[in-house]
Amino acid sequence: MSFGRKGLEGGAHVPASRGRVMLNGEQLTDPVEDRRTAFLAEERSRRAEVRPASRSQEGISDIAASYQPAYSRSGGERNIWIAYLLWFVIGQFSAHRFYIGATQSAVVQLALFIGSLIIMFIFPPMGLIGFVIWALWLLADLFLIPGLIRKHAQGAPSPLFS
């Protein structure tokens, strides 16, 4: 009885090199291993044909090579008039910045607005200072919207405080 590879005759063992079976000192070929080796060689040659030759990073997977950051996967072009309408109607909630795709600065702007309102009830002078900063930033957005839309169209991430 042998505790070797399943399906081997008694006295057969598998050496450290895969694919060859030894039976009483005689090498036998494993048809499954030969098919696997042929399949892998065929797949490598097929991928070499499909893969572009000008690839700068050899050894990187196709999925990693085709990865695009979230900011470059835009949902299409943004209309400047919709951004201005959002700025005018619900600008205090940074809706225009969320629409444009500048979500980090939109969250900071919204937190500044809500935080200023809360602090205004606790310590009015500090809350008023935060509220004035928020209002000036909102007014500056009137002039910053075209640049933010241009950056969004180019696929570049927008800076935090622009």
Image (spheres, rainbow, N blue to C red):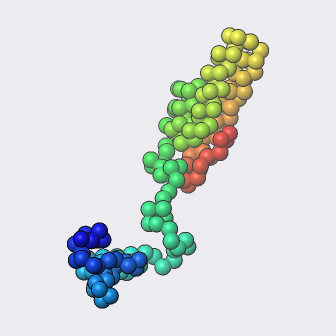
Which of the 4 quarters of the picture holds residue 44? Answer: bottom left
Q: Residue at x 57, y 41 (%)?
A: 102
State whether residue 2 is above or below residue 27.
Answer: above
Q: Residue at x 53, y 41 (%)?
A: 100
State whether residue 14 is above or below residue 100.
Answer: below
Residue farthest right in this picture: 125
Quarter of the picture containing the N terminus is bottom left
Residue farthest bottom in this picture: 26
Q: Residue at x 55, y 55 (%)?
A: 154
Q: Using the image as rendered, state which of residue 90 and residue 35 is in the foreground.
A: 35
**Residue 110 visible in the shown view:** yes
Residue 30: % across, % down: 27, 80
Residue 162: % across, % down: 67, 41
Which of the 4 quarters of the picture holds residue 161? Answer: top right
**Residue 35 visible in the shown view:** no
Q: Residue at x 63, y 24 (%)?
A: 113
Residue 58: % across, % down: 52, 73
Labels in figure, total: 0
Q: Using the image as rendered, state which of residue 160 and residue 40 is in the foreground.
A: 40
Q: Using the image as rendered, state which of residue 4 and residue 107 is in the foreground.
A: 4
State whether residue 1 is above or below residue 96.
Answer: below
Image-based side of 35 in relation to 114, left or right? left
Image-based side of 60 in relation to 125, left or right? left
Residue 34: % across, % down: 29, 81
Residue farthest top in this picture: 121
Image-based side of 142 in relation to 155, left or right? right
